[in-house]
Image (cartoon, rainbow, N blue to C red):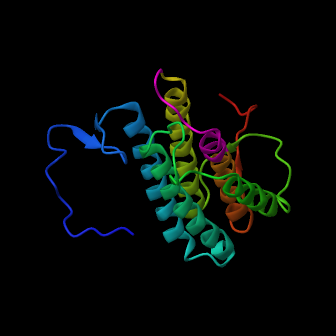
Amino acid sequence: MVKLNKIYTRTGDAGMTGLGTGERRRKDDLRVEAYGTVDEANSCIGLARAFLSDLPAGVGVAESLVSVQNDLFDLGADLCVPETEGEKECLRIRQSQIDWLERKIDELNADLPALRSFVLPGGTQAAAALHIARSVVRRAERLMVALAAAPDEKLGEPALKYINRLSDFLFVAARYINSRTVGDTLWEQDRPR
C-alpha cells in the first residue's frame, strides 16, 4: 500500500534519487530518465482523457486510457527496480497487459480506413494530445532500449514489448477519435513546395 504523508523529503536536493531497491542514483541516470519519461507520457495521457470528456465517441477510449495509465505505473515500478537473479514478487509488466493492448488496438482499428499516407498529428484536441503522448512514449522506448543495452543493467522483454505496443495503441486511438469527428489530416507528398 502507498502512503505519502510528506511530499518533500529534501533527499533529492543534491541531484540524487532512490530506486525501488533503495540504491541512490543521479537524477540524470538512464534508468531514472526512462521511468521519468514514462511518467511524462502518463501525464500526456491524462490530458488526452480530459479532452475526451467532451466527445461522445471518446467514452470507450477514455476507459481504456485509465487502464493504460495504471499500466504505466506498473511500468514505472518495473523500471525503478532493476531485475535481479532470483527476485521475488517485484511488480513487472506481464504478457497479459501486452495482449490486452493488442486486443484494444484491433478493436479500434477494425472500422478505420486503411492508411494510404502518413497521418499528421492533430485533429481534435484529444487526438492531438494522444499524438503528443505517442511521441513521448516513443522517447521512453528509445531510453528503455538504451537501458537494456547498457552494461550492468537489466530490463525485462515484456516491458520493451509493452512500450512499443503502447505507441501503436495511442496512434490508433487518435485516428479512431478523429474518424468520428474531424477525420485524419494526411501528409501530402505531392503538395506544391
Q: Quadrant of the C terminus?
A: top right
* Of the pair 190 and 141, the residue shown nearer to us: 141
Q: Is residue 7 magenta?
A: no
Report which quarter residue 127 is drawn in: bottom right
Q: Is residue 154 magenta?
A: yes
Where does the image place residue 23, in percent across and percent down from the top left?
30, 39
Residue at image position (54%, 41%) is 86
Report which quarter residue 107 is drawn in: bottom right
Residue found farthest to the front = 86
Q: How many numbered marks appear?
A: 0
Where does the image place residue 181, in percent across and percent down from the top left?
69, 68
On screen, residue 51 versus residue 109, left or right, reads left
Asked whether residue 182 appears in the rendered view, the answer is no
On screen, residue 110 versus residue 169, left or right, reads right
* Of the pair 6 and 170, the residue shown nearer to us: 6
Where does the image place residue 108, in percent across and percent down from the top left?
77, 62
* Of the pair 49 and 123, the residue shown nearer to us: 49
Residue at image position (54%, 32%) is 142
Where does the image place residue 18, in percent across and percent down from the top left?
29, 44
Please report the bounds of the magenta region as a residue range: 151-164
**Image height check: is 22 above or below 70?**
above
* Of the pair 75 and 36, the residue shown nearer to us: 75
Residue at image position (64%, 76%) is 59
Residue at image position (43%, 52%) is 39
Q: Quadrant of the N terminus?
A: bottom left
On screen, residue 88 versus residue 97, left or right, reads left
On screen, residue 149 versus residue 178, left or right, reads left
Asked whether residue 87 appears in the rendered view, the answer is yes
